[in-house]
Amino acid sequence: MNCQNYRLITIPIRHFSEKARWALDRLKINYTEEPHVPVFHRIATLKYDGSSVPVLATENHGNFVDSTDILHYLNGIAPQDKKLYPDIPELRKEVEELEDLFDEKLGVAVRNWGYFYKVKDRQAMRRGWCTNTPWYEQIGFIILFPFLSNLLQKKFQLTAENAAKSLAEIQEVFDLVSQRLSDGHSYLVGDNFSAADLTFAALSAPVLMPSEHFMKPQPLSELPSEMATVIQELQATPAGNYGLRMYREERYFSYIS
């Protein structure tokens, strides 16, 4: 679709990275993903004026340091039948409002709730952070894991009380999505897949564990029982069913269309 060289700077498991990755894949844009272990990612993002991931570096159009900015940019170069935002102003406003809600509430809550259960699990964190990263960063992870684990616990205030609050926020968003879908529509806004659908599914992936995710989910039997129970409950909701359907039907849509 586009002859530019694109570089996507990511942390492998980060759900906001998956949001950008999905948009690039859907639009059949050739890009090189550069995954990094947390802390080391700052070395890669600083040269693009970013502090977090994802960052999309382009040859001719500058760099984009936020997942929503990335989607807006990609929408601008997408063919009409692959647009992520509707042309109708009222519908576009709905999509953008939902995307902001998912970014600011769901994305943060999913991160904090998941890290509460996994941040002390060296093997789980190694898999999520180190997949396809440079070998020297993987060695750094082994050395720095105790420091990184403690850093995240303090930075995100990963306590049982806050995990419960995060879960309540996840459930609130799932309830809202379930309600929006109760009229029988296949998508959140209008009759077509949009950035709202993509964002909800991508940011819900850590709590829905879709088999189509590039990083195959752990069996529920390997998770803390309390965590596994919540995941099963979320999967069974209308919003959960919808998020899983988006992965089945839309995640690799571009490859078969």
Image (tube, rainbow, N blue to C red):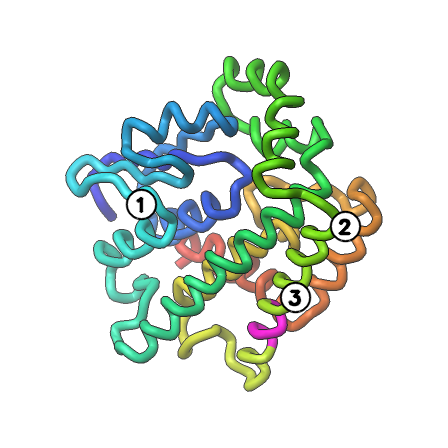
* Residue contact between numbered discs 1 and 3, judged by CB atoms under 8 Å: no
Mark 1 and mark 3 lie on one chain; the one further toward the N terminus is: 1
Sequence-first disc among 2 and 1 = 1
- Could you tell me residue 189's position as x and y percent? 42, 75
Residue visible at 53% across and 62% down in the picture: 246
Q: Amino acid at mark 1?
A: Ile
Q: Residue at x 36, y 47 (%)?
A: 66
Is residue 20 placed above or below 128 in the rendered structure? Answer: below
Residue found 73% across the figure and 31% down from its top: 121
User: Which of 232 and 63 lies nearest the eye of the viewer?
Assistant: 63
State left or right for residue 137 relative to residue 63: right
Q: Give the label, 2 or 1, closer to the camera.
A: 2
For numbered disc 1, what is the local secondary structure?
loop
Q: According to the image, label 1 marks what residue?
A: 29
- From which residue to which does the magenta span run? 174-178
Q: Report the amino acid beneath label 3.
A: Gln
Measured Cα–Cα span from mark 2 to mark 1: 36 Å
Q: Would you place residue 156 above or below residue 36 in this image?
A: below
Measured from the top left, where is residue 117 in percent x and y?
Answer: 73, 42
Q: SS for tag 3? A: helix
Mark drawn on residue 227: 2
**CA–CA distance between discs 1 and 3?**
34 Å
Where residue 220 appears, x then y in whole percent? 78, 47
For the point 42% across and 63% down, the residue is 99
The residue that disc 3 covers is: 171
